Image: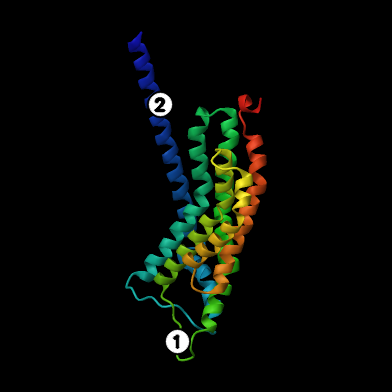
Amino acid sequence: MSDKIEHGAEETFISHLVELRDRLVKAVYGLAAACIVLMLWPGPAAIYDFLARPMLASLPAGSKMIATGVISPFLVPMKVTLLLAFMLALPWILYQVWAFVAPGLYTHEKRLVAPLVISSSLLFLGGVAFCYFLVFGRVFKFINEFSPASISIAPDIENYLDFIMSMCLAFGVTFEVPVVVVVLVRMGLVTVEKLKAIRPYVVVGAFVIAAIVTPPDIVSQFSLALPMWFLYELGLLIAPLFVRVTQSPDTAE
């Protein structure tokens, strides 16, 4: 009898490994497909030109960036293309993760995980889009207005990419504030009333974080701190509703 139980457990473990392998392969196929599509159209060069628009718009007419590395004109656009492909394939990748773990979850747990995965993905992409379309143009214009007339501004494409990536990552992560608030409340680690009580400290903390992760100008700091504060308030509004929807039947009773 024990041999049958052990044999069944071994078969179950192997089937899980096979399922995990299949989901990983499908995720890689999705990422590869996104890369191929972007390589063919619009192409790495056009993608980097689009990424460089906020900086070029703030420079004098006819200005261009420079490449100090020998292979930078090839390598940097390729990096941008791979990053964009990952962002486009992220919903497919997260779906594979969800499809792998969903069969082992209860109904109320599925109601908990699925909204968190979807909302965290959308919030991260929303933070990146907010940074690119609303922040970069104002930040670069503000910085270049303070540049002395004796300086000719010619940003290096690799340094520019590093700056863009760090800023987009900072905004993407900080836009996850509602998810963090909801998870803390749902796990019972803190109550909504307690989070409301510490609101002044959260506001100060938002400005401190913005001062650390953004350039030393007031435009970019306010552009990060104010949305972070707003998203914290949004998390306080959503958390009670989310807790009620995702309760297990025993807890609800």
Query: Where does the image place residue 139, in percent across and percent down from the top left?
Result: 55, 73
- The amino acid beneath tag 1 is Ser
Residue at the image position 42 percent from the left and 40 percent from the top: 24
- Name the quarter where the C terminus is drawn: top right
Residue at the image position 47 percent from the left and 65 percent from the top: 212
Residue at the image position 41 percent from the left and 29 percent from the top: 16
Foreground residue among 179 and 1:
179
Q: Is residue 132 above or below residue 146?
A: above
Q: Earlier in the sequence, mark 1 or mark 2?
A: 2
Of labels 1 and 2, the one closer to you: 1
Residue under numbered circle 2 = 15
Neighbour class for label 1 at 10 Å: few (<14), some, many (≥20)? few
Q: In this view of the protein, can residue 17 be seen by the observer? A: yes
Foreground residue among 86 and 201:
201
Q: Is residue 232 above or below residue 47?
A: above
Give the farthest residue toward the bottom.
Answer: 150
- The amino acid beneath tag 2 is Ser
Q: Is residue 244 above or below residue 88?
A: above
Residue at the image position 50 percent from the left and 62 percent from the top: 209
Residue under numbered circle 1 = 152
Query: Where does the image place residue 96, in percent across and percent down from the top left?
Result: 49, 39
Q: Is residue 153 left or right of residue 113?
A: left
Q: In this view of the protein, can residue 41 be seen by the observer? A: no
Q: Which mark is residue 51?
A: none
Secondary structure at badge 2 equals helix
Q: Separation of disc 1 and disc 2 at Cα?
A: 62 Å
Secondary structure at badge 1 equals loop
Q: Is residue 200 above or below residue 59?
A: above
Rendered image coloring scheme: rainbow
Q: Is residue 47 left or right of residue 75?
A: right
Numbered label tally = 2
